[in-house]
Image: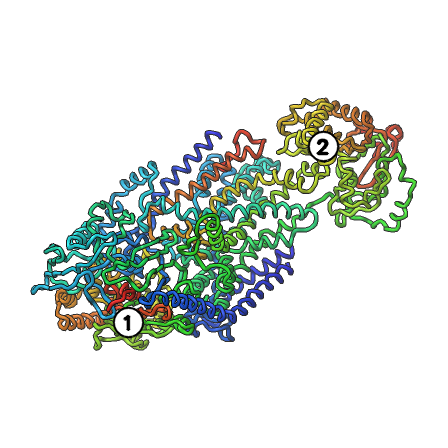
Amino acid sequence: MRKVLLGMIAILLLTFMTACGNQEATKPVIEKSDENTQAEASEQESSNAEEKENTKEVAHIRLGWANSGFPSPFTFSPNGPGGYLRTTFIFDTLTWKDDQGMKPWLSEKWQISEDDRTYTFTLRNNVKWHDGEDLHADDVKFTFEYFKQHPFGWHGDISMIEAVEVVNESTVKFVLNKPYAPFLQEVVGIIPIIPEHIWSKVEDPYQYQEKEALIGTGPYTLTSYEAEKGNYLFTANSEYFKGKPIVNEISYINVKDRALSLQNGEIDAAMSLNYQQMLQLKEKGFDVIQSKPTGSAVRFVFNLQDDQLKQKELRQAIAYALDRKTIAEKVLGGNEMVGSAGIIPPDSDWYNKDVKQYEYNVEKANKMLDDLGYTKNEDGMRKDLVLNLLVSSNAKNAQLAQAMLKNVGIELNIQQVDTATFTSLMGENNYDIALTGHIGLSGDPDFLRIWFMGQASNAYAARGKVFENERFIQLAEEQVMTLNEEKRHDLVNEMQDILAEELPTLLLYHRPFYWLYNDEQFAGWFNTDGGISDGIPLWENKSAFLNEE
Amino acid sequence: MKNKTIKSYLIVFILIIILNFFLPRILPGGPVAFIQGGDDQSFIMTEEQKAHLLSYYGLDLPLHEQFYQYIFGILTGDFGLSILYKTAVTTLILSHMKWTLFLVGIASIISILLGIILGILSAWNKRKKNDAPFFLAMLMLGAIPEFILGMVLLILFSTKLGWFPFSGSTTPFAQYGEGIIGIIAGMKDILHHSFLPMMTLTVVNISSIYLLMRNATFDVLKEPYIYTAEVKGLPLKRLLFRHTFKNAFLPVFTLIMLRFGFMLTGAIFVETVFSYPGIGKLLQEAILSRDYPLMQGLFLIFTITILGMNLIADMVYPKLDPRIRRGERTVFE
Amino acid sequence: MNKQQRFGYGLLSLFTLLAIAAPLVTKHAPLDFDGPSLSLPTIEYWFGTNELGQDIFSQLIYGIRTSLFVSFMVAGISTFISVMLGLWAGYHEKADQMINGLANVIMVIPNLLLVLIVVAFTKGSLWVLILTLAFLSWPGYMRIIRSQVLTLREREFVKAAITFQGKHSYILWRHILPQLYPVIRAKLLITAQMAVITEASLSFLGLGNPNTVSWGMMLHDAFQASTTFMNASWQWLLIPPTSALLLLTINLSLIANGDQRKRKTKKRSIGKLEKQPNEKEIENKSSVSDLEQENNIVTVHHVTVAYDDSVAVSNVSFSVGKGETCMLVGESGAGKSTIANAIMGMLGRATIEGSIFFEGKNLLKMNQKERQKLRWVDISMVFQDARQALNPLLTIGEQINEVLIVHSSYRLQAAQRETEHLLAEVGLDKSVTTKYPHEISGGMCSRAVIAMALANKPKLIIADEPTSALDPVLRKKILELLKDKIETYEISLLFITHDIGIVAELADQVVVMKDGNMIENRNVFQWFNQPQTDYSKKLLSYG
């Protein structure tokens, strides 16, 4: 027995020692990986030197993202933005966003009628499908009609479209049933145009996974998809109407950990959520872009039908009781941005600077709770105030919140469930507080209407339950029909004021995303204004790979 | 085989087919709830989209109609379309199954062979002198949870030493070239990726087979016929592998067959640690996303494998033991 | 309880104590996040902190609570179900069918899948996990207990209890349950270990309960964060929970398997050795060279055999001449078989003193290889129970062939012919070669064993009560066969028996053994006519 014990101790010591030894050894390894990328880069330089006219061309970029299914517009997985993003490499939309904001893409220009209900697009005339056919106005009409029958699996509300009419071969007219302010960004900027000559023959697009399903007009074609591993290889479309992309091949590898793979040289650029991790990689020589505006947030959703939580003062007291700055700092590792009570992030164009905010204030929280009649017992807990916190993947935030609320005498029970359970519990209104985190706050502010007016069937808001505030409802409906920016700003500002006062949801913090890359290999990355496709705060925007004048 | 055995197989099989339909549906939230996203969702789904999804997958039908469809599907060998991957369940399972079978298959063969040989030798040595140190070492090995061993190997050999890749089953988009060189390069790549997970599975499984074999052998070594064989002056190899092994293997055989069936599901931890694209990962995703057709397909595959292994054990057993030619002894007693 | 188990229980108690005293041992609450992020181990934070600034040491100690709670509960509940259903199934035929049916289904369902499904949506509750694991883990041991109950029911003392008391619950409780303690103990420990591993594994997959701290969750959190692998923090994030988990599981499995390792092979002993024979004395006696007579095939000279500190045979001397038959007579336990084993070199770990000469050469001075050469070439055996002595999975032919092939370098075909010939000599048809032992009668087995003993025409056959398992008619036939063969081939015979009737038929010489001592060694006629000891007289009067 003693021998065995000694052996075990020896093994432990050994692992410790190798561990410590390796700690020092990490640096050379990193340097080596740097050398590798440098070597690759110089290789590219030499190969590029041969064909001098294309000096900016990059042979291959490797990126990391999870598997998101066959990238046709009907089969990509909506779990996470990766599926949609990769579809946009193959398919184009009428409008698109880059760092300068929205611009025409498949269209050349558009006209909006006086009543804001008719959009007339003139299509570019040099656009060809990957199979060599020309893009026609018929394809656009077909696309929207087809998606009416077979709903798109992403932000796909096209219910405001009354009719799509082909004016001539390169002109198409959309008639809306009422004005819709984010139409250009959120409808024609998201729905991919698909070829009529392929899909008109397809009965069940959700099962259609032939090669033809990937014929788009986009800058890339899919060369290889390793389905069970989730790896994608895209090759530049040399016939692209905006010219051949600079990056010849893009591969997406389903790596286990993007930051780690970036450090090990398995991929060339990666997104990180953690400030410390970003600093660490920056130190190792990677360049960084921070997402701006911060389109992502972590927040509490209060069940407004709960007997206790329907009291505004209780919600406000919780806001005062939470040291949201510390939560953000602990979870994100620094560079924190406390959540705005008005939901829209402070670095967004739509942010209301005068909106009410809730500073961390335990005294105030305690007083408000006392005033509400929740008295503390000898243990310092308010025995009538036991709340459930529903989470599925943000358990860390929940643990921190639990400890903070205990300080003011509120007992918070963390109820961790998986995604589907989470959604169904919310759908059944079977929760007190739900903790959710998501992106999409940087785009058009219409999301406020969708969240709180029961438009979204998701857990974005108290689902199917309208936030019963007359003024808010009125404002929300008005802003979506207001195309005048200035007027719309005023409306959205007032909406933020109401939200901040009523707190149907409490934003804990906004999450900046960081993009880490090696600029010697490819430096064309940029922050898309308001997020790719109106809300995705990532950097894999296809227009980054294009050589546009 | 006796009628009674066939009957008990049939009953279990029918029960499982029924269970297989209801088990996934007991879970709270359905596939559409998953698509809508939990607390980390990224898109806003409208009620129309939701209704369309429900009707597309036939989830708005009454339960009994869904059940008929399911039974009809099984009878025609069609497990339907995976909701998560939008691919036929059969295709999906087959493409992942090959990796798991490769991993589990080789790991099983190595661990069974080594476990048996070590078990016999250990039991023999125990009689002669003392196998305690070795026995204890194996006991400890057997007490290590799979994921811990995998994690330790991953950290040491992948992250720290960099000898093996961090995840996956092959180099992405690898082109191995033509002919034999290509095949060799491909095999090298696959083995390079599978080495650590395979090691983990082998090491973790070796101990239980070793322990079974050691105890069985130890019991057999006490039998008079082994005394006979020893007195007969037979060489050690013949004594152990002809006289002892044959007898000691009998009680171990059924257990090994059962274990083999369970190892398929057991690979889930190793596949998680090493991000190996096997069936365990698929299963995890299927459960998480409430992908009913995929869950049903996988569950059926697992139970059929286990039942099949039992059946094979039942059929092979009499061949191993001449005393039982009438197939009395079955796993189901 | 052996040393190793004592240590194991000690460690387990220590773990339990730590779990109970967790608030006293730790400075920080496990979920408090006051510390700096990813701090190295310091005096304040003994094992460092994690990303959120939580104290690893505290989490480790509180983690014991979760692990032990789950393992004790699962083990307790599962064992309870196993025992209850096992007893019921063993006692009640109708219940037996139902319980077994249920067990079959549970055993075929992929357990892990079911656990995953159940745990996936009840992440909050440890109790759900506990009940699921308990529900899935009872069938294996239920069967073991059931079959034990079935055999116990047939035992005399239980039968007696049934006739006297009749009350089932009382019998189960008082008579059967105590017999099951070893099984129950093993079941408890093995299930406890399984539960610890499963809980940790599930938490590692991210299916743990965030309200409680567990080792699996610590590992999950550390393994999920890529920073863990990018700096040195994995050392204090991963090593402590890994070590703790390993310590607990290994410890449980050591306790569970402790008995097995130390399970002694109990040998008969005839009491303590009064006085160890003086080595010099033995040396002196064995140097007598006139004992090494040429015409003696085997000479046993002052042989003492001891297992550990108990003596099986003490100071036995006799010799068997060429063609002579020597009877070794005595009750069972007298040490007769020990003598045979000493000659065959089959004493294992026992110590042996004295000398055994075979054709003038001291067997005890030979190395294993030289002895091996004598086996079945010069000395063969006929065994007590012929059917038991034959390997059930090999045909009779194979078992005879191999001694020819191994020792006399026969080719397979020649060996097969020789085997048929040998079988014919003992009166068996050649079709017997392809038969397995269970396919032929007991008498045929005895004949086959004799044929096997004759295979290499040895100089000595040791027959260890070869006829005790046979009926009188058969016994006579077999003895005649044996007698005929040794006379034909001039083989010496050392015949061990407690049957005085046989002595008269076969013996030239008689050695009487009692309690490990040789009390008489005489010519058979002298012994029958003038037995010198009371014991011999007693034996003869029974005979």
Q: Amino acid at mark 2?
A: Tyr
Farthest residue to the left: give it. A114
Quadrant that contains the C terminus of chain C: top right
- Whether C293 is drawn above or below A262: the answer is above
Q: 10 Å neighbourhood of mark 2: few (<14), some, or many (≥20)?
A: some
Up/down of B271 relative to C494, above or below: below
Q: Which mark is residue C172?
A: none
Q: Nearer the viewer, residue C36 or B200?
A: B200
Q: Is residue C298 left or right of residue A19?
A: right
The amino acid type of the residue labelled 1 equals Lys
Instruction: Give me the chain letter of mark 2.
Output: C
Residue indicated by mark 2:
C410
- Could you say which is closer to the camera, residue B190 or residue A333? B190
Indicate the position of residue C285 as horizontal and vertical percent values.
Answer: 89, 45
In this picture, residue B9 sits left or right of residue B37 = right
Can residue A191 be seen here? The reply is yes
Name the mark on residue A292: 1
Quarter holding the N terminus of chain C? bottom right
The quadrant where residue A184 appears: bottom left
Chain of the residue where label 1 is placed in the rendered structure? A
Q: Position of residue C486 (x, y in %)?
A: 80, 27
In terms of depth relative to the viewer, which is nearer, A239 or A340? A239
Please, is residue C521 above or below residue A185 in the view? above
Colour scheme employed for the rendering of this structure? rainbow
State the image coordinates of residue B307 (x, y, percent, origin top left). Answer: 45, 39
Instruction: Return the residue nearer the eye: A419 or A112.
Output: A112
Tag 1, which secondary structure? loop
Q: In the figure, C249 relative to C153: above or below?
A: below
Q: Position of residue A487 (x, y in %)?
A: 13, 72
